[in-house]
Amino acid sequence: MSQIDLFRVLTALALLLAAAHGMGRLFARFRQPPVIGEILGGLLLGPTVLGQLLPRAGTWLFPTEGPVAYGPALVYQLGMLLLMFTAGVEMRQVFSRQDGRSVAVIALAGMAVPFGLGLLAVRFVDTADLVGPAGNVSALTLVLACAIAVTSIPVISRIMLDLGIIRTRFARIVLSVAVVEDIILNVILSVALGMVAGGEESGFGLAHTLGITSANASAAYHSVASVAFFGLMTLVAVVLRRRPGGTTGTADRPPGTVAVRMVVLLAVAASCVFLGVAAMFGAFVVGLLSGMTGQDSQSEPLGRLKGFAAGFFIPVYFAMVGLKLDLVHSFDLWFTAGFLLVACSAKTAGAYAGARLTNRSKAESLDLAVALNARGGPGIVLATVSFDAGIVNASLFTTLVLTAIVTSQTAGWWLERAVSRGVFAVDCGPAPPQDPRAEAPVDAKAG
């Protein structure tokens, strides 16, 4: 890399990080999700604002291809992996036996109803206006259904933490349902990504090696591969937990433990790429199952890893999400409004019905439904990976990101009103985890 290219890369990363943290802190000051501010920071540097005011400067700093584009792109990918890893780490102790039936019923209804309606809705829209360069309508259908059914773990937990209701049974149920839904939807997304990768002429991975090229065979292979991967990782975690001394080992050597965690994370993500499983799903599973080895999520090693990820990689990831948005050329107001209406109605109806089936009051059922409507980080990750894979085009990518932002804002506003009415009471049960990016006070680390 030449000196001028290195200068451009470092300058671009510095601007992205400064914009993300600056806007994130501003949003946090007004008790809004910092992630939205981070996306807005990237939006200001992208084609929507900087590209309109100083197009040559925008192209020079943030080219779409070439060596200068590779540096921020690598940080972007690492940020996504670390976001999913830290989200998984915090989900280890969220479940409670007394809420098992409620979680199962709400998760089933809250996911099956919107997912089914999403599959049905695709029949009534012109997919030619939505499909990306990959041209795979089946993968597009799965992504749209997932986008309607997905729930955010990091954003909704941050909202409930800020409102002081993170220790309530309500919060525990919401986060438990979100974990179940996200695991299943991540498997489905892995299948969609695998269907696209398997159809490439210059394909890479086990499916390509085995000669699996047809759409049906590819879908079957990636379904089996995703489930088998999750099962294998669970088995490995159980073995490590039962191994004598397996829960200690490097606990007294924080730097070594961080290094081992990163090696495992990157190795598993690379293995996922070869197997045709979404790398972000691998990162999430590594984080989710890491608790089975006995490592405390608030320990110094994991604290260091999460702190650096939250300070650099994750804000740059969200800033680059905003950088990809083009509200001037790729924003369809009426389609976005229609999609938002369908997505919110379907998710609310499914979650509300599930809550009512568990004998909850109408008011509590509605609160649960609105909270589970927040798509936040997972919705944004789904949009970015499907856009990068060529499953969706720029217009649909913009719609999916805006849907994640609007639903997260709505959930925060709704729950804040519920808290003001005094409908939540703190119980003595195990505390649900904090948002993986909220270990420190807002004025110390907003992003």
Image (cartoon, grey):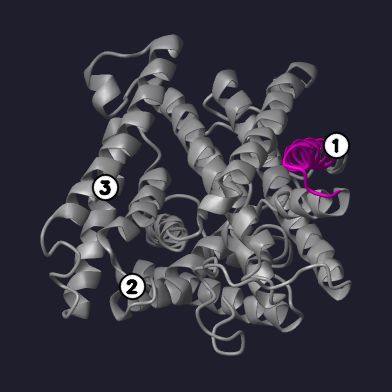
Label drawn at residue 268: 3
Q: Position of residue 10 (x, y in %)?
A: 41, 74
> What distance separates the C-alpha of mark 3 from that of mark 2?
18 Å
Q: Is mark 1 in CB contact (under 8 Å) with mark 3?
A: no
Q: Name the residue under label 1.
A: 338
- Whole-angstrom CA distance, mark 1 to mark 2, is 42 Å
Q: Which quarter of the rendered picture does the C terminus lie within?
A: bottom right
Majority secondary structure of the magenta segment?
helix
Q: Earlier in the sequence, mark 1 or mark 3?
A: 3
Q: Which of 256 and 58 is in front in this view?
A: 256
Position of the N terminus, as image quadrant, is: bottom left
Image position of 363 with respect to 138: above or below: below
Left/right of residue 97 with respect to residue 238 in the rendered view:
right
Other residues around mark 2 within 10 Å, as few (<14) / some (14–19) / many (≥20): many
**Residue type for callout 3:** Val
Q: Earlier in the sequence, mark 1 or mark 2?
A: 2
154 lies left or right of 337: left
